[in-house]
Image: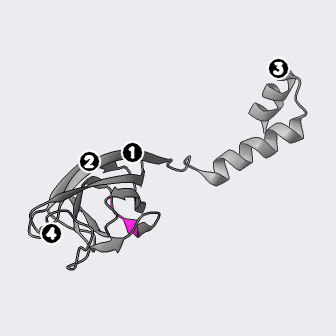
């Protein structure tokens, strides 16, 4: 309280306000981690045996990890997951344009995006099996 009183006098802030603010900072503890995003356009094969590798991001603390399919040309579903530096993979999810795959309680580490065509029928994929499509996505992770 003595520190709060001297700070209050120095900055012209009432002592009660300084004490409340100081207590709030100690009670809250660490500043929460922030979400970061990165977007990329990736070429994904129409052959599901060919895995496309996207950006690598660093998940700084345990938290959510999201991949949003912004668009694909031509329109295709995409099966997406991420693999960390130790080879551990998040469970694959299939998403369409405008949809988001979300994983919770993801441990810290470096994660690389992986993607394959999401549907075996792949009606829109050029050359079905031999062609590819353009996939635009955004990754949101805890920095």
Work out which residue is located at the far top of the displayed protein and give it.
Answer: 10
Looking at the image, is mark 3 or mark 1 nearer the viewer? 1
Classify mark 3: helix, strand or loop: helix
Q: Pointer 4: what residue?
A: 128
Classify mark 2: helix, strand or loop: strand
Among the 4 quarters of the image, the one containing residue 132: bottom left
Looking at the image, is mark 2 or mark 3 nearer the viewer? 2
Q: x, y percentage for residue 100?
A: 44, 66
Q: Earlier in the sequence, mark 3 or mark 4?
A: 3
Residue 121 vertical position relative to residue 126 in the rendered view, above or below: below
Relative to residue 107, is residue 126 drawn left or right? left
Disc 1 vs disc 2: Cβ atoms closer than 8 Å? yes
Q: Earlier in the sequence, mark 1 or mark 2?
A: 1
Q: CA distance from mark 2 to mark 3?
A: 49 Å
**Residue stretch rendered in magenta on the structure:** 102-107
Disc 1 vs disc 4: Cβ atoms closer than 8 Å? no
Classify mark 1: helix, strand or loop: strand
Q: Is residue 86 visible?
A: no
Q: x, y percentage for residue 31?
A: 56, 46
Viewer-nearest residue: 44 or 8: 44
Q: Pointer 3: what residue?
A: 10
Q: Pointer 2: what residue?
A: 55
Residue 73 vertical position relative to residue 8 in the rendered view, above or below: below
Residue 142 vertical position relative to residue 118 in the rendered view, above or below: above
Q: CA distance from mark 4 to mark 2?
A: 25 Å
What numbered label is drawn on residue 38? 1
Classify mark 4: helix, strand or loop: loop
Which residue is at 27% across, 73% downward?
92
Q: CA distance from mark 3 to mark 4?
A: 73 Å
Which residue is at 36% across, 65% downward?
106
Q: CA distance from mark 1 to mark 2?
A: 8 Å
């Amino acid at each position: 309280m003595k520190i709060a009183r001297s700070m209050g006098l120095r900055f012209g802030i009432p002592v009660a306000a300084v004490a409340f603010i100081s207590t709030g900072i100690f009670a809250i503890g660490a500043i929460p981690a922030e979400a970061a995003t990165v977007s990329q356009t990736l070429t994904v094969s129409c052959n599901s045996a060919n895995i496309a590798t996207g950006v690598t991001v660093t998940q700084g603390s345990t938290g959510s990890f999201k991949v949003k399919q912004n668009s694909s040309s031509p329109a295709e579903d995409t099966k997406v997951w991420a693999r960390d530096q130790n080879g551990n993979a998040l469970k694959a999810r299939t998403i369409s344009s405008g949809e988001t795959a979300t994983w919770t309680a993801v441990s810290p580490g470096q994660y690389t995006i992986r993607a394959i065509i999401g549907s075996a029928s792949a009606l829109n994929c050029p050359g079905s099996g031999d062609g590819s499509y353009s996939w635009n996505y955004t990754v949101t992770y805890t920095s």
